[in-house]
Amino acid sequence: MDASISLTYLAAAVIVPPTSLIVLALAGLWLARRRRAAGATLAACSLVALLVLSLPVVAFSLMGRLEPPPLAGARAVGDARAIVVLGGGVARGAPDWGGDTLGVFTLQRVRYGARLAKVTRLPVLVTGAGPLNGRPGEAALMRDALEQEFGVPVRWFDERARTTAGNAREAAALLRAAGIGHVVLVTSAFHVPRARRAFEQAGLQVVAAPTGYVGYVGDAGAAFEWTHLVPGGDALRVSYLALREMAARLMYRVVDRQ
C-alpha cells in the first residue's frame, strides 16, 4: 500500500468513530480542568455517542442504509457477460494457513462469485491489490482460491489498482478489450453503492450482486430482538464500518481518487 493510501486510511481511522469520540472525550476531560461544565459536557456527549454506536440496533440501522436488496436469482444478471469480483482485504500472516490468506470480506465475495459463475457460466475477472514487500497480492490469492478451492477458472486478473475507483478503471480497460461492457459486480453489500458508482463512471453497465449482509431487513433479514439493545464491541465495529463507508462515499463524490 503506497504512502498516500496509507495516509487516507490513517485519516479515516482517526476521524471516524470510535477513535474520534475517544479523542473528544479525553479533550473534554482536559478542558474540564479549566472549564468544568464545558469539559464535562463534551466528555459526556462523546461517551454517550460511543455507547449509542455500540448498540446493535443502531449498527444494523446504519448498515441497512447502505445495503441494497440481494440479487434476485441467476436470471437477474440479464445481459451481463462477465462477473467481476472485488477484493476486500487480506489476512496477513494467518498461522493456520502458514502465511497470507483471504480476509473475511474477500472470502465472502469470492465464494459468492464462484456460486454465480457456476450457475451463469459467465467468465470471471478478479481485481485487488498487488504484491506488497514480496508477499502475495490480494488478486493472486483470490484467483488461487477460485481456481483451486472452488473450481472456477479466472479469465481476467488485475492487481495494479489499490482503490475501488482504480479497480473499476483497470477492470473496465480489460473488459472493453474483450468487447464486454455489461457486468455482474460482486462485492460486500455495504460497499455496493460506492463500487457500482465507480464502475458506472468507468463506463460499464452494472448488475450488483451484494453479499455479506449485516443490516438488511427483508424477507430473509433477521427480525428485531431485545438483545439488539445491549451494547457490544461487535456492534461498534459494524457502526465503524458503516460510518467509514459513508465517509468514503462522500470522498468519492468530492475527489476522483486514482
Image (cartoon, rainbow, N blue to C red):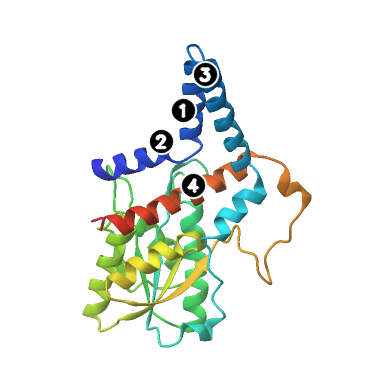
Q: CA distance from mark 2 to mark 4?
A: 31 Å
Tell me the tag on residue 127: none
Q: Is residue 58 above or below residue 152?
A: above
Rendered image quadrant of residue 195: bottom left
| Dot 1 amino acid type | Val
Q: CA distance from mark 3 to mark 2?
A: 19 Å
Question: Is label 3 or label 2 in front?
Answer: 3
Tell me the tag on residue 14: 2
Q: Secondary structure at mark 3?
A: helix
x, y (%) of residue 110?
47, 64
x, y (%) of residue 97?
49, 47
Residue matched to label 4: 97
Residue matched to label 3: 29
Q: CA distance from mark 4 to mark 3?
A: 45 Å
Query: CB atoms at circles 2 and 1 under 8 Å apart?
Result: yes
Q: Which class describes the residues within 10 Å of circle 3: few (<14), some (14-19), or many (20+)?
A: many
- Residue at image position (61%, 34%) is 48
Earlier sequence position, callout 4 versus callout 1 = 1
Earlier sequence position, callout 3 versus callout 1 = 1
Tell me the tag on residue 23: 1
Q: Quadrant of the N terminus?
A: top left
Q: CA distance from mark 2 to mark 1?
A: 9 Å
Q: CA distance from mark 3 to mark 1?
A: 10 Å
| Dot 2 amino acid type | Val
Pick the front one: 213 or 153: 213
Rendered image quadrant of residue 216: bottom right
Q: Is residue 2 visible?
A: no
Earlier sequence position, callout 3 versus callout 2 = 2
- Residue at image position (53%, 68%) is 68
User: Farthest residue in the top direction?
Assistant: 33
